[in-house]
Image: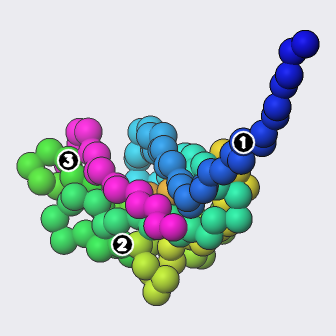
Amino acid sequence: GVTTTSTQISITATVQPYCAISASTLSFGTYSARTSDATTTIGVTCTTLTAYTVGLDQGVSSGATVSTRAMTGPSGALLQYGLYSDAAHSRNWGNSAATGWVSETGLGIRQSLTVYGEVPAGQYPEPGSYSDTIIATITY
């Protein structure tokens, strides 16, 4: 006859907290001294129940801060703009608790965080193309 014996294999794994972040371009289009609003999204995927914050830095324009951002254009000309975490543009989106980073909790699926941008009215810089680069950082 044939004899068989069985045993169990224990299977284990440890899941570490993890987050991934991605972002899309924020384009204000053509500006003609009137308030210009635009939005973009930051995609965040974090392990379930992982608390995280997303901060936006000041960008690369001369003299910019997280609350007074600017795009740079021809001859170093600046076009001021702001980034906010709410549609009313009342909550600045900065890179610390004091300057308004965004705090959320991971759901194990992609979450879209909306960035609300505004170029204030009444600016008359040199015509041309203006741009800035913002670094979005997730901390978990």
Amino acid at dot 1:
Ile
Q: Quick check: is 36 in the magenta stretch?
A: no
Residue 6 sits above or below residue 33 on the image: above
Lateral position of residue 52 relative to residue 112, left or right: left
Q: Is mark 1 on a helix, strand or loop?
A: loop
Amino acid at dot 2:
Val
- Position of residue 10 measured from the top left corner of the image (x, y, whole percent): 71, 47
Residue 17 sits above or below residue 97 on the image: above
Q: Is mark 2 on a helix, strand or loop?
A: loop
Q: Quadrant of the N terminus?
A: top right
Q: In which quarter of the image is residue 89?
A: bottom right
Lateral position of residue 65 relative to residue 110, left or right: left
State the residue lying farthest toward the front.
1
Q: Magenta residues, as a range?
A: 125-140
Residue under circle 2?
66
Q: Nearer the viewer, residue 42 or 58?
A: 42
